[in-house]
Image (cartoon, rainbow, N blue to C red):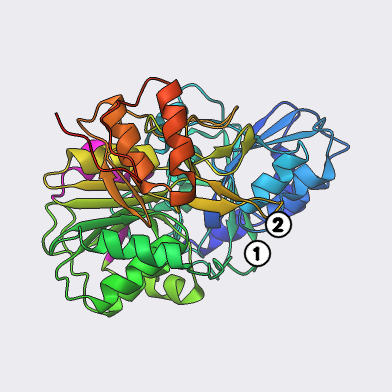
Amino acid sequence: MNYTGEYQKKLVKAEEAVKVIQSGDWVDYGTFQNQVVMLDMALAGRKDDLRDVKIRSACRVSGPPAAAMADPTNESFTFNSGHYSPIDRKVGDFGMCYYYPLLFREVPSYYQYATVDVAMVAVTPMNRHGYFNFGPTNVYSKKTCDLAKHVILEVNPNIPWVMGGNQESIHISEVDYIVEADWPLMQLPEIPVKYEDEKIAGLILKEIEDGSCIQLGIGALPNALGRLIAKSDLKDLGVHSEMMCDAFLEMWEAGRITGMKKNIDQGKMVFTFALGSLRLYDFLDQNPGVASYPVDYVNYPHMIAANDKVVSINNALEVDLFGQVAAESSGPRHISGTGGQVDFVEGAYMSKGGKSFIALSSTYTDKEGRLQSRISPTLSPGTIVTTTRSTVMYIATEFGIACMKAKSTWERAEALIELAHPKFREDLIREAEKMNIWRKCNKRPTMAQCVG
């Protein structure tokens, strides 16, 4: 069947397509690399015609949202994000972006409580069978379109066609309007790898076995670990990861990844979204060795645990002496989001032989140039707990790795203080004593452990 005629009937200018949006509507913009650009600009142009349009998005990467920037008072448009990118964060600092808390694995089910009047999503060009592909961003794109009253696609030839397990594509028969665009995909900038990242990566590398199934988050540490794995003699690694990044490409090119020891999706590098370089996007295009799935497949703990020896590595901003992990806010200022950290911490722990690592450098330098500890007595006021103390498994800094499972409060405090920078250890001990989570016989960095 030839779908060209149907395509031409639905093809309109962006300004025409956004006329379906009415005051009070909820509009979904897509997530990550399939967020719309031309349609966003066209909607911004309707600022004076509309009131109280709510926009739902996650991790804006293709420039500041034009609709939000056009209406700083939020009278016409209110922009909401389920995961802050650096762009969302800056827009949020000016009161033009609001975070909605979530467990990433659960988002498709949230739509039973939410409204989608219009879904606008960026996709690949249509193939001869009438399908458009969501490219490097499966996530919950299809779910959004299925529930929307109106579906508008922004077709971009720069988006790679990524093969999937399911819900990676949408058919033209499910679409109301088509808008053509030609903007470049965002490339994730190279994040400098510091000494602390190299040190932590080296410690975690020793915990990885042949046949392990790897999940990596975003940042310098995954890049450092990927390079170390690529240079190692590890064999038959698998990939089941929320995010596909360049570190996996390096491991694959070095022959470390085969996926042949996986229990599910054997031989496939499984993910729900990808962010990286143009080289990564080119690798994903039409590659049968990768498979994108919706987030409620990739991130559900029982699906993660279906593979043995899952190794999960995620970052944090701060950890307190009780083992609470903060990865999304600094005080009340929102930085990123819960993302899939909780999903993979739980899933890796459930996996046979699995290990979950929360990794962070022991210190940071504040705006005044002062060295501060990332391991603190209690989390800074207003800081959001991402991973609870009951859930966390391993915590790693450049000074070592400690398991939190089966540890009492005084054991946790002792282990975490040993992971802190030496400059702060005595102060942390004093605070632990005040909070009654320190025994007289606990080890001190400057004293031998007492006996008897």
Q: Read off the residue under disc 2.
A: 38
The residue range painted magenta reads 290-308
Return the mark for residue 181. Answer: 1
Instruction: Determine whether label 1 and label 2 are within 8 Å by CB.
Output: yes
Q: How many marks?
A: 2
Residue located 68% across and 29% down the image: 25
* Rendered-image quadrant of the N terminus: bottom left
> How dense is the environment of label 1, judged by Cα within 10 Å: few (below 14), some, or many (20 and up)?
many
Q: Amino acid at mark 1?
A: Ala
x, y percent for residue 90: 71, 48
Q: Amino acid at mark 2?
A: Met
Residue located 25% across and 43% down the image: 448
Residue 135 falls inside the magenta stretch: no
In the image, 300: left or right of 258? right
- Residue 299 vs 241, above or below: the answer is above
Let me know if residue 117 appears in the view: yes
